[in-house]
Image (cartoon, helix red, strand yellow):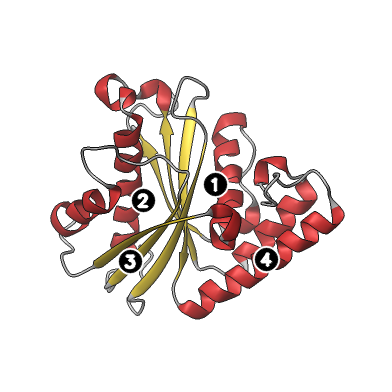
Amino acid sequence: MYMVRSVDIIDLYIDESGNLGAQGRYFTIAGICCENRQQSKKLKNKIKKCSRKAKGKFNNCYTNNGEVKSAECNIIIKDYYYRSISNIISSIYYVVVDLEQVYGNLRDHQNILYNYLLSFLVRDILKDYDNLSNLKIHLDNRTIKVGHEKTFGEYIKQKVWGDFNRPFVNINVEYVDSQRNYKIQAADFVVNNINSHYLYGKNIDSNLTKVIKKKCKFPYKTFGK
């Protein structure tokens, strides 16, 4: 098992790829772990450099607000991002759902399904980082959230402190603007590559596979059937 006992603080940057609605079979949530401020700052500066370089050479790789999106990039840009990310971060975790195998109320309530899936990703991180005392989760403010029943922050604290039996882990959830957060942009490149593997059978980039520590397939017994 992958263990990092010496790490007590993690910044987790999360993004998603796919559609929880009627289109597409697979939906993936991926998280990039930064284990200290230096690593987080280094990733920010590197992705900022990647963004400037991509926009300087290619005109069609970014949105109207200037954010470079993986889905709009060619393989040259993507490879540059993959290498840059894997040279800095320590670990990637992801969960992928086969939507054809999800039924009933869980499928109908997309916000609840999203948070349920995200709890698996957090669970796997807690298993590996057994000395963790602080987990800060950064989400794109345009992402899917739990509706009126519970906020995601309340939900994940309940899961971590109760179901996962880690009551001493401090949990903070932050919603950020992806066009201004280069670490969320890095997560966009990671999750887009992973989801393409399940949707189209493309190989996950070899640079990323070196730092992917855990993957979770849901539902486990019927995934891909």
* Sequence-first disc among 3 and 4: 4
User: Which residue is painted at 23% across and 48% down in the image?
Assistant: 155
Q: Quadrant of the C terminus?
A: top left
2 or 4: tag closer to the N-terminus: 4
Circle nearer the viewer, 3 or 4 = 4
| Numbered disc in front, either 2 or 4 | 4
Q: Which mark is residue 48?
A: 4
Q: Is residue 65 left or right of residue 126?
A: right
Query: What residue sits right under mark 1 in the picture?
Result: 191
Query: How far apart, in angstroms, are the residues tagged by discs 3 and 4?
Result: 24 Å
Q: Would you call the spot at circle 4 few (<14 residues within 10 Å), some (14-19), or many (20 or more)?
A: some
In this orientation, which residue lies closer to the viewer: 199 or 160?
160
Residue 71 is labelled as none
Coordinates of residue 73 in the picture (x, y in percent): 74, 45
Q: Which SS class for mark 1?
A: helix
**Of 139 and 217, the residue lying toward us:** 139
**Discs 2, 4 touching: Cβ within 8 Å:** no
Q: Are marks 1 and 3 in contact (CB under 8 Å)?
A: no
Residue located beneath label 3 in the image: 135
Mark 1 or mark 2: whose residue is earlier in sequence: 2
